[in-house]
Amino acid sequence: MLSTSFLVIFNFFIFVHFLIMQRVYERLQSSLFSRFYIFSAVFTFFQMQDLPIPNELLEFVEEDGAYTPFSEPIAYIFSNMIKEYMRAIEILNVNENNDPDRIPKGYTKSLSKYNKIATAIENEMRKQGYLNPKPLVQGSFLLSFCHPDEKQLRAGRAKKILTPTYIYLNKLLEQKNKRAGRDWIDKWKENERKITIEDWNALTNFLAFQWCSFLKISNAKDLIKRVKCIVKSNSAFYRFGFKLFRTHGKLFGDGSIQSADNNLVIHFGKDHSSEELFVTIYKNGIRTSVDKYLNQKQPNNGTPIELYIDEENFLYFKLNGNEVYKTLINKEIRQEIYMLAWADAHEYQVQVENIEISY
């Protein structure tokens, strides 16, 4: 029979062995879990990078890899979706006003409100298998859509940040029968986007044909729909107008503003002999008619000018709110549009103010 002391010692060694094996098992389990977690996190990171941008957003974000969310269409679409989200789930203690255009009380610069939305997006992405979406969607990012400051306007963002935000907001808004992503995209396309540019002081340009001064107002992305401005001049002889022509066309022809390619020059002005304003048109370098006198003088506060092109490419030219010319143009000459001022062999000064361009 084994002695009592031997049994005590034997049981002690059994107990110590159990503790050692338990510790080894725990460390092994922890190591395997850590490796699995790291693998999952890395896999999720690359998976999130590859999350495709929804097709309806591609036309607004397909340019370069580094992307800032403050382009006009993206800021418009996402800020309105965020407003709609705030109204839909009433996380900001808003009143019961059902006006669909009501700005939520929480649509302020308070970061906490946007952190709530970011947390909701984060939780939804985790449900879909993304373990760590937080670096991609943050409240400050959502806030910057709605209330960007100068520092944020210069900050680069990755396009991948847009996708989880859009997917989550779009899904929730559709479920609640609210205006979702496609609705705001369509509304953006319907609205004219307006910009204003600095006043232009057009002076005699001795280096150009007809001493013409010029300013390009078109861009490569958007076709201009409307240009409005105020034209002032104390010069006894001057011309002001627009030249429209196609990409790679000619701003100047052989010795003058007029060129034989596909273009339109439309301008108004005055001569030494009269204070009465007149309008003149050239198509493809050919004058369409004699000067059309308008029986009106330049107002003391300047002449309001409007150039408008509708969806069917009918062009309208207005002075002082009155339509003085209308014609159907070829769409391709909308690609390049310049403001022009000149006075042939005379010196001049033309001040162009309140320049507003709509796309």
Image (spheres, grey):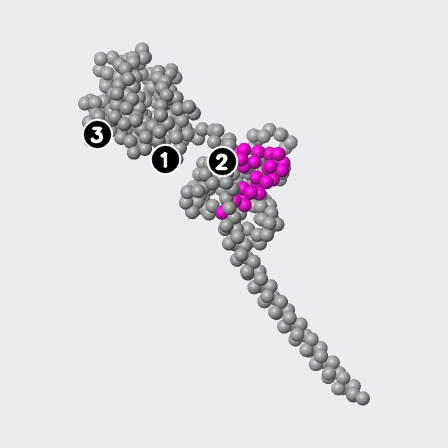
Q: Is residue 38 above or below residue 64?
A: below
Q: Earlier in the sequence, mark 3 or mark 2?
A: 2
Of the image marks 1 and 2, the number of the one nearer the N terminus:
2
The residue pinned by badge 1 equals: 220
Q: Which residues are magenta?
A: 160-185
Q: Are marks 1 and 3 in contact (CB under 8 Å)?
A: no
Pick the front one: 131 or 83: 131
Q: Residue drawn 51% across and 54% down? A: 46
User: Badge 3 is on which residue?
Assistant: 208
Provide the residue designation for mark 2. 76
> In the image, residue 228 lies at what x, y percent?
38, 24
Residue located at (60% from left, 29% from top)? 99
**Residue 194: where, in percent of width, then height?**
42, 30
**Which structural element holds mark 3?**
loop
**Residue 98 in the image, given as x and y percentages of width and height:** 62, 30
| Dot 2 amino acid type | Tyr
Q: Main secondary structure of the magenta part?
A: helix
